[in-house]
Amino acid sequence: MRLYDYARSSAAYRVRIALNLKGVDWEAVPVNLLEGAQRGEDYRALNPTGLVPSLDTGEGLLGQSLAIIEYLDERFPEPPLLPAGVFARARARALALQVACDIHPLNNLRVLQYLVRELGASEEQKLAWYHHWLQQGLAALERQLAGGASPFCCGEHPGLADLGLVPQLYNARRFGLDLAPYPRLIAIDATCQRLEAFAAAHPDHHQEV
Amino acid sequence: MRLYDYARSSAAYRVRIALNLKGVDWEAVPVNLLEGAQRGEDYRALNPTGLVPSLDTGEGLLGQSLAIIEYLDERFPEPPLLPAGVFARARARALALQVACDIHPLNNLRVLQYLVRELGASEEQKLAWYHHWLQQGLAALERQLAGGASPFCCGEHPGLADLGLVPQLYNARRFGLDLAPYPRLIAIDATCQRLEAFAAAHPDHHQEV
């Protein structure tokens, strides 16, 4: 499979981890977000949203990281990325959506660019915005997961919620957020980072185009 | 089931449609977003994100509209809200996520309040922001769905992608966006509005607390 990818895109990072966990044979097609390649007609002809990632599955192109991950989980059932049980599955999806809907869209590159270019936000205001939505979102996740003793967000195996969390914490560190208030999230992240599938997906191991 | 609801919340509106399509017996528990009830400790003790909707399923509380809809679809399989076929299902999820991740989070009440209170955005700048993300997102959806002849986003029956689209178009109208560039979306919306499950979920039929 071919992943239209950008190393530091946290949505693409989620999919890289999923591809690695599933043991899928894949290659990256770099899309340079800083040069705006995702907004060009070449890319939009593939994915009209102008956003990464996209996965060329061999049976069609898919956008939206969580849809791609659900696709991989249905197409390649082992190891499962969602828990057994209807309610447990919904809870795992909700945790992932808290990252994908409540944090990441607000801190996306295109949004930061809009704040600066259209609303004249200063660097300080941009960073305050970034930290604000991260803090709101991470505090909710910490409260929901605190007290749990499982190594991962939803049990004994890495899954969808971890694929949301780990790239988001990478972004949080990159933007200098104090992570001390989130000890449970940090512990889950550390457990994930020790797995080869997560380590190999890290932005530092992918080409900066 | 009990839905922690706000009439004009488009995320809650999605879930109301799903509950109606599934024929679930449910009641609304209004949460007054304008008064900030969702940020109060009473509500956060139920849902730490401080966001609506939440569904009290009887086996636990769930947040995140798309996770709730997937839960309902697994718990009550008829009528299905996702197409048959792994790739078709992923495509339907991607369309819904384009609304839930790429449009709605940017135009949420808490974000508009931040723009005004923290960044000093004028009413004009706030509206331009709102329209900008709507136009980006609706243009992508129109391009992906144009040329199709099915009555709904993904075939002959209403499903997850329609549950994303219809509330988003309600918001677009409410904020005065010109919808002429999106004839295919308008046609699908009109088809949906003729169904009782959609009509009964409309904000006008729900209590403004």
Image: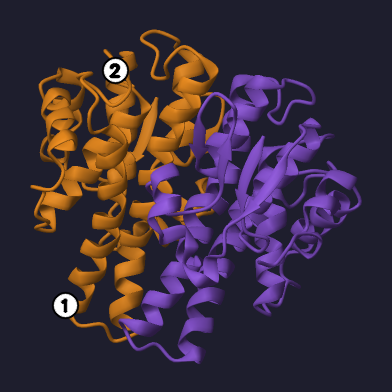
Chain colours: A orange, B purple
User: How many numbered callouts?
Assistant: 2
Q: Which residue is mark 2?
A: A21
Q: Observer-nearest residue: A172 or B149?
A: A172
Disc 2 marks which amino acid?
Leu
Above or below A168: residue A69: above
Above or below B123: residue A34: above
> From where the camera sits, is residue A30 visible?
no
The location of residue A140, given as percent across then percent down, is 31, 46
Q: Secondary structure at mark 2?
A: helix
Side (left or right) of A109 relative to B6: left
Disc 1 marks which amino acid?
Glu
> From where the camera sits, is residue A162 visible?
yes
Q: Residue at x 34, y 53 (%)?
A: A103
Q: Residue at x 32, y 40 (%)?
A: A12
Q: Are marks 1 and 2 in contact (CB under 8 Å)?
A: no
Q: Residue at x 12, y 53 (%)?
A: A174
Q: Which residue is mark 1?
A: A123
Q: Observer-nearest residue: A176 or A17?
A: A176
Q: CA distance from mark 1 to mark 2?
A: 37 Å
Q: Secondary structure at mark 1?
A: helix
